Amino acid sequence: MKKSILFLLLAVPALAQDPVQYVSPLVGTQSKHSLSTGNTYPAIALPWGMNFWTPQTGKMGDGWTYTYDADKIRGFKQTHQPSPWINDYGQFSIMPVVGKPEYDQDKRASWFSHKAEKAHPYYYSVYLADHDVVTEMAPTERAVMFRFTFPENKNSYVVADAFDKGSYVKIIPEENKIIGYTTKNSGGVPQNFKNYFVITFDKPFTYKATVADSVLTESRNEVQAGHAYAVIGFSTRKGEQVHARVASSFISFEQAEQNLKELGKDSFDQVTAKGKARWNEVLGRIQVKDENTEKLRTFYSCLYRSLLFPRSFYEINAQGQAVHYSPYNGQVLPGYMFTDTGFWDTFRSLFPFLNLMYPSMSVKMQEGLINAYKESGFLPEWASPGHRDCMVGNNSASVVADAYLKGLRGYDIETLWEAVVHGAANEHPKISSTGRKGVAYYNELGYVPYDVKINENAARTLEYAFNDWSIYQLGKALGKPESEIGIYAQRAFNYKNLYDRETGLMRGKNKNGQFQAPFNPLKWGDAFTEGNSWHYTWSVFHDPQGLIDLMGGKKNFNHMLDSVFTVPPLFDDSYYGYVIHEIREMQIMNMGNYAHGNQPVQHMIYLYNYSGEPWKAQYRLREVMDKLYTPYPDGYCGDEDNGQTSAWYVFSAMGFYPVCPGTDEYVLGSPLFKEVTLSFENGKKLRLSAPANAGNKPYVRSVKLNGVNHTRNYFTHKQLQNGGTVLYEMSSTPNKSRGTAEKDFPYSFSKGM
């Protein structure tokens, strides 16, 4: 009897009332250049914070700043890195050491163990064995507090490393303070770029030294060099705690001091508690109830990653006004700015997720885009912190359109309309990923040709066509005349120009109208971007019905979808000359040629909802969620990419996904949990209930929306935002009659013309 009672208690679904405790910032950190399981680092930060902090295991300048398999920590680094491939800017570190004032990153490094490490979004702690020091840190949006617990030692030190490529430090002993700046960056900054920092301690210095390019000079308080450090020291008792308050600014030392006020007079524990409360507030917009703790950990770890980028790149001045250093023209200007996101990745689900759950934050981001356009003449496509030459497409159009079409207001949409129209008609003079590379060919021929030395041309064409559709929909919503916007509707069908009936796939096309030859649909890159034709053929977000028609109907379309999983994981890497990590991640997952670890194919499974076989989507989506995501350091199946791969999971676990940003529809999948409650900013709540859900029940037998049978393969934005209850009946066998009628299929442009 006692065993039965215990079983019943254990089986009761747990409500994640303290959701941040399910988050592991270490998910995805067991990565390397040749194989990504996320390519993340533990971002100790607040949601959308300007500054992140992380333990640094990699060498200075190494994009893999923290890897789970490392043995030593070199310092605790302020970072703005969006990915190892883009690398970092505005970076410096601090490190406690004992015995000698070792400043060199290798000599000061200390062994550590994950068993003596605690990582939460709002708090990090680790024991540095070589120095017998416990280091803790707790962040605000632009500041952080450190707590160092030292051993008994007459020679305890803290090193402030301003990094190489031009830096400055100054020790102000009468204020227990270090100030400095770092200029180290990886691109995307104006000539006058600096990150100014200030560090204050609660213990007087008995030792001080500065280092200029490997030359340490004691009692010299100020130095400007290629690589500058400051070292301060004191005698400590066993267990003595020394606190450091740190903040930085891209504007000035004075603004760094202003940002330091975020810490106020709070103790370390108070800063920690406030950070925890902030994370619970933001994560708590989605309350999940389920008895599977591992899935709760996976979900909330993904939700945490969805709330980091794009990061705030604005500061609050002494008058309480938002101001920013422009990464585009180097001026200090009023208003919001956000950065460190690549729209090629994040237009797909990250920005639609923010528009659904955090629209007031999205409004600020739209205002940031307005400022980016005013300051540079273009909307960014990949920003870190300014324009970066990375990836393809003109997907800023989607980011702008989806926000407005989902009802966001209160910003200058007319300037954004001007920006998207400008971006669609122009190439950036220096940054090939900004604007539209090959736009003259695209506008004349209806595609970017394969043989005109523009790489990844087919990918560009397919994305430009979707971007044109986005512009057309936005123009209609703004009441623009058809004479002005009709051309975008026409170009939205340009995807058809690359469809090859012989292979049933998208294929690069030469300027003379002939398809590229020879053609290997398994060839990665070349005409496509980080994928092959099997992946990019489905990049017709706005018109799946048009693609179905090209393929000869639903039966052939479904067969081609099936084939992505049944084609072996073969590949042609000749374009790159070696097996890039994205290829390897596809190969080892045992899902055929399905490459969920990269973005182009992530919406593909949902397309079964457009072709009368939604149960296949349900089965495959559950397989991906169960197999390819975990709450462990190897928890992703490829690059996490600024929240996109995480937002895919968050949406999919809730049971729906925005296949086509810019529509008001979320396409149905297979809900993962027994109960999820969404709290919207409009005050409404939506309860998603699947009481009989289980690991062996991926199939949706029926759906009721507020008590009414719901046969559609999608929900609308309004239906979700109105709140109420969605009741799923889940099953271990597919219901092959639900969602198979044409009237139940989601939006396609061909059907809406």
Image (cartoon, helix red, strand yellow):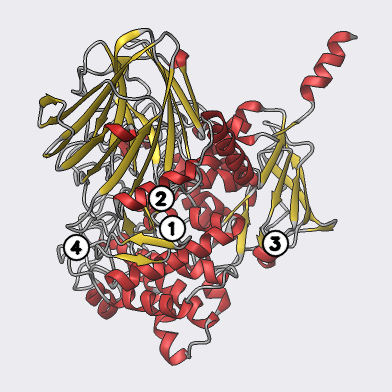
Q: Which mark is residue 318?
A: 1
User: Quick one: label 2, few (<14), some, or many (20+) residues within 10 Å?
Assistant: some
Q: Which mark is residue 258?
A: 2
Instruction: Choose the circle earlier in sequence order: 3 or 1.
Output: 1
Label 3: which secondary element: loop
Instruction: Choose the circle earlier in sequence order: 2 or 1.
Output: 2
Q: CA distance from mark 2 to mark 3?
A: 33 Å
Give the quadrant of residue 483: bottom left
Label 2: which secondary element: helix
Amino acid type indicated by mark 2: Gln
User: Going 26% across and 38% down the picture, which residue do you hit?
Assistant: 580
| Residue 50 horizontal side relative to residue 388, left or right | right
- Which residue is situated farthest in the right direction here? 1
User: Going 57% across and 74% down the picture, which residue do you hit?
Assistant: 751
Instruction: Choose the circle earlier in sequence order: 2 or 4.
Output: 2
Q: Which mark is residue 682?
A: 3
Q: Disc 4 marks which residue?
A: 454
Is the C-beta separation of discs 2 and 1 under 8 Å? yes
User: Quick one: label 4, few (<14), some, or many (20+) residues within 10 Å?
Assistant: some
User: Above or below — where is 22 with respect to 73?
Assistant: below
Label 1: which secondary element: loop
